[in-house]
Amino acid sequence: MAEHNSYQYIETAFIHGGIYGDERTGAVNTPVYLTSTYKQDALGQDRGYEYSRTGNPTREALEALIAELEGGHAGFAFASGMAALTAIFSLLSHGDRILISSNVYGGTFRVLDKIFGRFGFRYTIVNDDTPDAFKAELTEDVKAILIETPANPLLTVTDIRLLAEIAHSKDVLLIVDNTFMTPYFQRPLELGADIVVHSATKYLSGHSDVIAGLAVVKNHELAEQLHFIQNATGGIQQPFDSFMLIRSLKTLGVRMDRHAENAEKIATYLSAHIAVKKVYYPGLHGAPGYSTHSKQASSGGAIISFDLEDEYSVERFFTGLKLIDLAESLGGVESLVCHPATMTHASIPKELREQVGITNTLVRLSVGIEHSEDLIFDLDQAIKAAGKQ
Ligand SMILES: *Cc1c(COP(=O)(O)O)cnc(C)c1O
């Protein structure tokens, strides 16, 4: 195991953090413990493991790693981002209320609306991403606030530090979905959040080959509660997928650097294009959330949304792309586009969708790590095709 005081930078922690390698054999990689159970040496005497739903060494290595990367007390690995969010929501009870921003991931809205609502745990959607708008909704029954910043798909930004102060003045938990930024660009716990959650399916995995969720909590009390829920409800990450994520996290820094470098070039290109009505990217100087975002994150990330001018056809734009695939998801090495109104945000009612700006002409682009010139070439010819009548 690496001495944790032998390095200072997160780039090194990606590779040496958590529980590095294997103490018994010296293997530099974490072994995959494909076991459901563990031999006990005598009645009531185990070696720290009893059953893999409760604990598995490969999953633990991943959990220790994400806890270290986010600067938290403990990490938890789940079978998906939604399983992680479901476990976090299970910290709340009947009669409690959660505030969510209007741009939250569609699945997050759906589980609150369609599942937790049936158990009497309510939500309020806050339509404006400013901390004051959340403050105005802080009724007595509010026990948690969940935000994404930048949020999906309009990349709106919320001031995490300010919102944490507001939340804590009323003993409310602040949960931040950090999927778009990763701990490389933004560490919400350091800004005052209580829980960070990831769809690790996205950048943390980075290769579009694993479905995974991670959660990190800031203190012992929340860790005990979330571990209890993780074990009781069982939405755990499997050992092999835990290994895959540890492997992916080793290259997170270099991948994110390239993702962001490409995204900046593409955002600049799109902003100058006459066919593009509006570009949403918090890394662009002058973008609405730019100043808040640059206080709390070190990069604009690599998700860009844009609205085509009315005379261009989104349908022809999508079919015109030759390199960039039309697909759900984001954060992989390959660039992907999607149509939020009919794909990721289809579970949000139409009126609410349009009210927040998720129009029919909105395109979301997850910028991969290909050469930026190839990506711009593909976008350029698809935009031309979209303009042909
Ligand atoms: C994809 C996503 C989720 C859901 O995660 P899954 O791994 O698909 O279950 C939650 N939040 C955000 C921001 C996402 O992009």
Image (cartoon, rainbow, N blue to C red):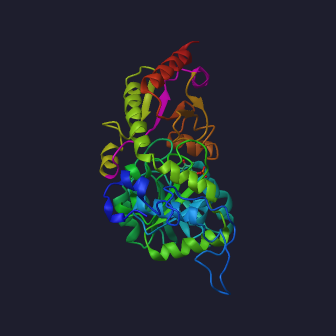
Q: Is residue 359 above or below residue 383?
A: below
Q: Position of residue 308 (x, y in %)?
A: 50, 26
Residue at 43% across, 45% down = 156
Residue at 32% across, 49% down = 292
Q: Residue farthest to the top?
A: 389
Q: Residue farthest to the front?
A: 25
In this rendering, position of residue 241 left or right of residue 255: right
Quadrant of the snapshot with the C terminus? top right
Q: Position of residue 47 (x, y in %)?
A: 59, 78
Residue 304, magenta (yes or no): yes
Q: Residue farthest to the bottom?
A: 43
Q: Is residue 239 above or below residue 388?
A: below
Q: Is residue 276 visible?
A: yes
Q: Which residues are magenta?
A: 296-320
Comparing 46 with 223, the one in front is 46
Residue 69, magenta (yes or no): no
Q: Position of residue 185 (x, y in %)?
A: 38, 49
Q: Is residue 103 visible?
A: no
Comparing 40 with 210, the one in front is 40
Residue at 51% across, 58% down = 27
In this rendering, position of residue 157 left or right of residue 231: left
Residue at 38% across, 29% down = 265
Q: Position of residue 41 (x, y in %)?
A: 65, 82
Comparing 44 with 369, the one in front is 44
Count all numbered tags in the image, as a single digit: 0
Quadrant of the snapshot with the N terminus? bottom left
In this rendering, position of residue 178 left or right of residue 132: right
